[in-house]
């Protein structure tokens, strides 16, 4: 028996609204199955089950907004564990009054024991205090009689849940919530077996520690998304982009809902970015990438491809960034609780502008291992779902380094604000033809300005410079990306 | 310079008398006897009987007179021999000094400073050994100070005299003979902030007044067991600077509060409650408290010591908090 609780989809999320159930009571769910869609203040996200079993019942109604951690459904191991319908309390008036003094009856009521079902050991079979206590001890919390305030058959409240009764320190609970681990499975070493901070940290390998909610960056534009099929196959090097969504901060008049959403997203972005600027000592570097080789290679590759699967420069830039992040671990990971934890995987956050305004930066998981085609596919999918509000928790929580690309908006360079608890943000500007000196000759080449905003608590300019230089080097051999 | 807590107190009094001729000292035996604890020794000769006034054994009377003189524009420093005897003046302190500003609609401040000794450990028996400063810290309208260091003994009085409202200064009897170095130019100190006297990341030890030396010693010995403690001297019991405590606990995740008062309803209870209110999700262990046993302080030495907080008890609580030795 387990309770499915409103998950935390980021450290700054306090509550969520269930907007859709994607399963129904009686359905069998596996770990990782999507069970519901939840509206946070920012976006609608699919949430997956952490349990395997049968959905027993929903504990909240559609449209209910509940705090993080509130049980929203019960999942049982087998259908047999489905609860019987709660029985209404038996009216006392109809039952022959068992012989018991009022104080004894009061005690029975308090302990949730039905006096009528106890055989009394007192004079004339009168029920005594001892009888009641024995009955209560023998059947803890099984009563069909006058229901105590929390009858076991009543839909389980938090107090009924074993997971809820895991002895643990408040810090351990907070940490478990942030890291998305279940306290119930962690052996406790504290007083009385309480789970402590140390126990939680010991149970979660550092690389699996989900960062605390990271959502928003400065107003940024979307990376290019799917190439519309109608786009003519021009040798034009400008990335074929969909009609660029202009981030709008003003809500549409007459679209209160979207306006409210944009408003709360703006506030969330503001809060997170303020925190970033307050807490993270940023340093900034920029370099101009020589994209002659990359663009030439891409044009050649695109000539072999149908329009729908053409590459765009962003794909190459993202892949090169992911590979460089793998090689320079000080750019890739999380700074939490006063220390930096490098991540062994590269989950590349991609800033996506949302139509009503604001943005999200979900992760391309293991971007360093994707082929360019896989990367393009996943990027399209991710951008589409981000705009439709169908991102998953892991995608929101996992980015280890983030990229923002404002080239589509004609911006030449962008210096981003780091998403806490990440430690680096890479910005790409527009790919331009530029006069370029090379081996004593002047020519025209494609180039773009790459910038790095990085956390000075973790690295310094030397390491940051090497990281940008690696991106440039990797782009010189586009065939290897 | 080398000095003692007693001498630092005396220097503070002398300094205040010299700087402001509205300041005078009155209390039992403050003049010809030189003070029950010799704090005012020599001041009668220096400032004369007008400003160093011996009073009858009548706490309610002379504290009331002090309140009246404060209302009349003076800056009285009233000494009460021990906090136990201050109970005779509770009506004056709580019903008059603490309330007049409010009841006069802000027209009358009561700029009085009342000094008294507090605390046990010197075999003076139950009627001279209790720590009741926590009671006074319950009262709105009073400011409660507990100087525990030479710098505070030297510096709190002048700042208290600048306060337009009543200030009570509690001097732990065991501190008077504490000797140490004090800057030659030591002067007034702030009375708003707690002080972090020792830095460590493993645990927060919170205390004030007479138990501070014990807590510092416990912290030093704990360091030998790799338990590194922040030591916070509250300094002011009302208004409490919970902020400093909470900041520390947010970093260390564990707290032990040491208070010579009785556990039930003591300042330690208030500190523990504030930690739970303001740093709950930073706690990794229950807040521990080391207080006096809930008995009238015994006269017999071994019983008295057994009833009071000790280095060993502080260390045991610290080990419990960090999960060492259970």
Image (cartoon, rainbow, N blue to C red):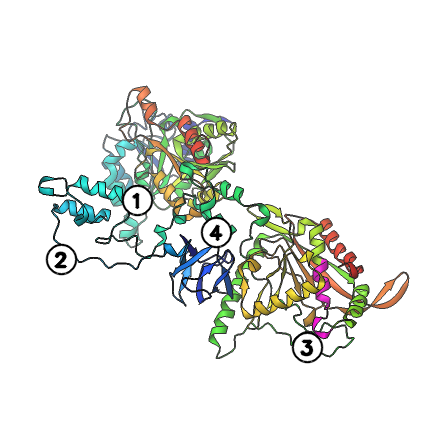
Residue under mark 4: which chain is it in?
A: A
The percent coordinates of residue A421 (x first, y second) are: 58, 53
Give the residue furthest to the right: A440
| C-alpha span from label 1 to label 4 | 40 Å
Q: Are marks 4 and 3 on the same chain?
A: yes
The percent coordinates of residue A88 (x first, y second) are: 24, 59
Q: Quadrant of residue B310?
A: top left
Nearer to us of marks 1 and 2 is 2
| C-alpha span from label 2 to label 3 | 76 Å
Residue depicted at 29% across the width and 23% down the height: B124
* Residue under numbered circle 3: A229
Q: Which residues are magenta?
A: A306-320
Q: Earlier in the sequence, mark 4 or mark 3?
A: 4
* Residue under numbered circle 2: A93
Residue under mark 2: which chain is it in?
A: A
As helix, strand or loop, the secondary structure at mark 2 comes to helix
Q: Is residue B224 left or right of residue A131?
A: right
| C-alpha span from label 3 to label 1 | 77 Å
Q: Which mark is residue A177?
A: 4
Are the residues tagged 3 and 1 within 8 Å (C-beta)? no
As helix, strand or loop, the secondary structure at mark 3 comes to loop
Q: Are marks 1 and 2 on the same chain?
A: no
The percent coordinates of residue A175 (x first, y second) are: 49, 48
Query: Is residue A468 positioned above or below B180 on the image?
Result: below
* Residue under numbered circle 1: B139
């Amino acid at each position: 028996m387990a309770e499915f609780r409103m998950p935390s989809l980021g450290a700054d999320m306090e509550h969520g609204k269930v907007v859709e159930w994607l399963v129904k009571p009686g359905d069998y769910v596996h770990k990782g199955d999507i069970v519901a869609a939840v509206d946070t203040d920012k976006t609608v996200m699919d949430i997956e089950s952490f349990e395997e079993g049968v959905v027993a019942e929903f504990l909240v109604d559609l449209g209910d907004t509940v705090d993080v951690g509130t049980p929203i459904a019960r999942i049982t191991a087998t259908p047999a564990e489905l609860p019987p319908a709660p029985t209404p309390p038996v009216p006392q008036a109809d039952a022959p009054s068992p012989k018991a003094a009022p104080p004894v009856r009061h005690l029975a009521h308090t302990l949730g024991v039905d006096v009528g079902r106890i055989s009394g050991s007192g004079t004339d079979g009168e029920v005594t205090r001892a009888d009641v206590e024995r009955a209560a001890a023998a059947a803890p919390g099984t009563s069909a009689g006058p229901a105590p305030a929390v009858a076991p058959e009543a839909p389980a409240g938090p107090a009924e849940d074993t997971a809820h009764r895991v002895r643990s320190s408040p810090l351990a609970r907070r940490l478990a919530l942030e890291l998305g681990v279940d306290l119930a499975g962690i052996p406790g070493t504290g007083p009385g077996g309480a789970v402590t901070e140390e126990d939680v940290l010991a149970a979660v390998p550092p690389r699996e520690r989900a960062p605390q909610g990271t959502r928003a960056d400065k107003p940024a534009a979307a990376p290019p998304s799917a190439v519309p099929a109608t786009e003519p196959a021009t040798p034009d090097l400008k990335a074929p982009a969909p009609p660029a969504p202009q981030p709008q901060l003003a809500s549409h008049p007459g679209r209160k809902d979207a306006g409210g959403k944009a408003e709360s997203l703006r506030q969330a972005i503001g809060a997170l970015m303020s925190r970033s600027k307050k807490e993270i000592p940023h340093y900034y570097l920029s370099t101009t990438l020589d994209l002659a080789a990359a663009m030439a290679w891409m044009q050649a590759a695109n000539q072999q491809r149908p329009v729908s699967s053409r590459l765009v420069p962003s794909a190459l830039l993202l892949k090169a960034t992911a590979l460089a992040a793998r090689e320079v671990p000080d750019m890739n990971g999380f700074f939490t609780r006063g220390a930096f934890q490098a991540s062994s995987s590269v989950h590349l956050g991609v800033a996506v502008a949302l139509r009503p305004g604001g943005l999200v930066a979900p992760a391309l998981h293991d971007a360093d291992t994707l082929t360019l085609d896989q990367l393009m596919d996943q990027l399209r999918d991710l951008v589409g779902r981000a705009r439709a509000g169908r991102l998953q928790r892991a995608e929101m929580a996992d980015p280890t380094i983030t990229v923002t690309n404002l080239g589509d908006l004609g911006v030449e360079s962008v210096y981003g604000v780091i998403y806490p608890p990440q430690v680096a943000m890479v910005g790409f500007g527009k790919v331009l033809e530029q006069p370029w000196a090379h081996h004593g000759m002047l020519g025209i080449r494609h180039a773009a300005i790459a910038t790095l905003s990085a956390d000075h608590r973790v690295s310094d300019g030397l390491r940051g410079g090497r990281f940008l230089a690696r991106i440039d080097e990797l782009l010189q051999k586009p065939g290897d990306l | 310079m080398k000095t003692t807590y007693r001498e630092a107190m005396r220097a503070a009094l002398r300094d205040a008398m010299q700087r402001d001729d509205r300041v005078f000292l009155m209390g039992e035996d403050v003049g010809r006897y030189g003070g029950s604890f010799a704090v005012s020794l020599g001041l009668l000769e220096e400032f004369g009987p007008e400003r160093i006034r011996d009073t009858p054994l009548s706490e309610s009377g002379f504290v009331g007179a002090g309140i009246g003189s404060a209302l009349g524009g003076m800056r009285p420093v009233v000494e009460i021999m021990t906090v136990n005897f201050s109970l005779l003046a509770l009506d004056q302190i709580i019903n008059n000094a603490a309330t007049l500003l409010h009841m006069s609609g802000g027209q009358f401040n009561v700029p009085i400073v009342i000094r008294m000794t507090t605390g046990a450990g010197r075999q003076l028996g139950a009627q001279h050994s209790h720590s009741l400063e926590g009671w006074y810290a319950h009262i709105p309208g009073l400011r409660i100070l507990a100087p525990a260091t030479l710098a505070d003994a030297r510096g709190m009085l002048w700042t208290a005299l600048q306060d337009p409202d009543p200030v009570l200064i509690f001097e732990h009897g065991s501190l008077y003979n504490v000797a140490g170095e004090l800057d030659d130019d030591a002067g007034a100190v702030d009375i708003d902030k707690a002080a972090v006297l020792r830095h460590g990341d493993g645990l927060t030890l919170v205390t004030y007044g007479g138990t501070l030396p014990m807590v510092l010693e416990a912290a030093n010995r704990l360091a030998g067991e790799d338990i590194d403690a922040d030591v916070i001297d509250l300094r002011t019991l009302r208004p409490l600077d919970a902020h400093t405590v909470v900041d520390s606990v947010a970093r260390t995740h564990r707290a032990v509060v040491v208070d010579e008062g009785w556990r039930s309803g003591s300042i330690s209870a208030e500190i523990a409650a504030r930690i739970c209110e303001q740093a709950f999700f930073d706690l990794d262990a229950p807040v521990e408290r080391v207080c006096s046993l809930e008995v009238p302080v015994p006269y017999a030495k071994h019983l008295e010591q057994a009833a009071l907080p000790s280095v060993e008890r502080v260390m045991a609580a610290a080990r419990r908090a960090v999960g060492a030795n259970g």
